[in-house]
Image: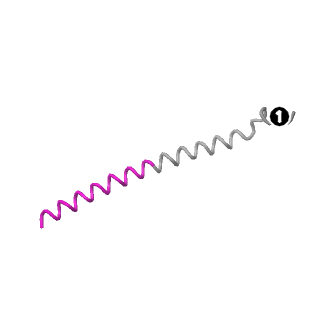
Amino acid sequence: MSIKRFIDDTSGLATVEYIVGAAVVLGTLVIGVTSWNNGLVARLESLVTQMQAVR
């Protein structure tokens, strides 16, 4: 009987949804910042290489 009551109880569902939503947002943010940082590093390395060629 307690298993049926646990399955029918949806009060904890909102908390799980918030946790999953926060994880998705955080994961997307981490991926975006990481890819932006990798692109920035590549551009800076390119600029340094060009500056060394000018010398």
Colour scheme of the picture: one colour
User: Is residue 3 depicted above or below 42 in this figure?
Assistant: above
Residue range in magenta is 31-55
The answer to which of 29 and 2 lies nearer the viewer is: 2
Q: Which residue lies most toward the right here?
A: 1
| Figure quadrant of residue 13 | top right
Residue 17: image location, x then y, percent = 64, 40
With 7 as the anchor, is 46 left or right in this view? left
Q: Amino acid at mark 1?
A: Arg
- Report the label total: 1
The quarter of the image holding the N terminus is top right
The answer to which of 32 and 53 lies nearer the viewer is: 53
Q: Residue at x 54, y 43 (%)?
A: 24
Magenta stretch secondary structure, dominant: helix
With 16 as the anchor, is 32 left or right in this view? left
Residue 31: image location, x then y, percent = 44, 48
Q: Secondary structure at mark 1?
A: helix
Residue 55: image location, x then y, percent = 12, 67
User: Is residue 43 depicted above or below 25 in this figure?
Assistant: below
Residue 37 falls inside the magenta stretch: yes
Q: Residue at x 13, y 62 (%)?
A: 53
Q: Which residue lies most toward the bottom here?
A: 55
Residue indicated by mark 1: 5
